[in-house]
Image (tube, rainbow, N blue to C red):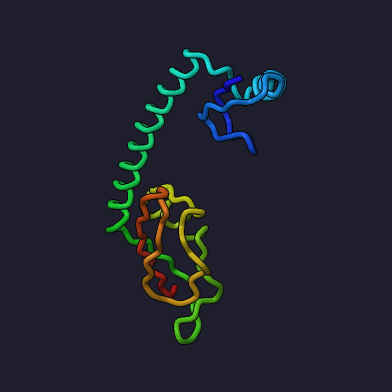
């Protein structure tokens, strides 16, 4: 039986694929658990329409990500912390603190998980932190760490 998969199914196929499986597996598992539906003309046309919508949405998300990356280019976030001799900070600046300060200073929601910060910032200075906005777009945020 030919089935259109509605979700990724391990060892069977990915979402949106048309796969050929045994009748019992299709009826008792895939269709019963709403992981797939019988590959009728109606289902195949709906799949094609959904694919077209997904492509359009992906294009829009990519454009928004490029615009956000462009707007972040000129922005700076200043973080003030106590520091000891030679510009060493007491503690470090994490991606969570950067996201919080960016929200308070710039009014922008920055996802701390998308900031590419291998380890915390432990010295005073200016840093360019990569921000992975989209799988194809990476922006950069300027962080200025100053002494209190």
The quadrant holding residue 14 is top right
Relative to 142, residue 136 above or below: above
Percent position (x, y) of residue 120?
Answer: 52, 69
48, 59: nearer the viewer? 48
Quadrant housing the N terminus: top right
Relative to 62, residue 137 above or below: below
Position of 137 with respect to 47 (left or right) is: left
Q: Residue at x 32, y 52 (%)?
A: 69
Percent position (x, y) of residue 133?
Answer: 40, 50
132, 80: nearer the viewer? 132
The tally of labels here is: 0
Relative to 74, residue 83 above or below: below
Q: Residue at x 43, y 17 (%)?
A: 45
Residue positioned most to the bottom:
86
Q: Residue at x 31, y 47 (%)?
A: 66
Percent position (x, y) of residue 25?
Answer: 70, 24
134, 19: nearer the viewer? 19
Percent position (x, y) of residue 139?
Answer: 35, 56
The quadrant holding residue 148 is bottom left
Relative to 99, residue 79 above or below: below
């Amino acid at each position: 039986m030919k089935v259109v998969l509605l979700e990724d199914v391990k060892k069977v196929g990915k979402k949106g694929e048309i796969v050929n499986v045994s009748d019992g597996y299709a009826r008792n598992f895939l269709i019963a658990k709403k992981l797939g539906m019988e590959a009728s003309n109606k289902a195949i046309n709906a799949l094609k329409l959904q694919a077209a919508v997904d492509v359009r949405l992906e294009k829009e998300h990519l454009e928004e990500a490029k615009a956000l990356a462009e707007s972040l280019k000129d922005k700076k976030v200043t973080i003030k912390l106590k520091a000891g001799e030679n510009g060493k900070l007491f503690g470090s600046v994490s991606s969570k603190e950067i996201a919080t300060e960016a929200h308070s200073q710039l009014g922008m929601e920055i996802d701390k998980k998308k900031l590419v910060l291998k380890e915390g910032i432990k010295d005073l200075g200016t840093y360019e932190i990569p921000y992975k906005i989209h799988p194809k777009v990476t922006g950069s945020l300027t962080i200025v760490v100053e002494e209190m």
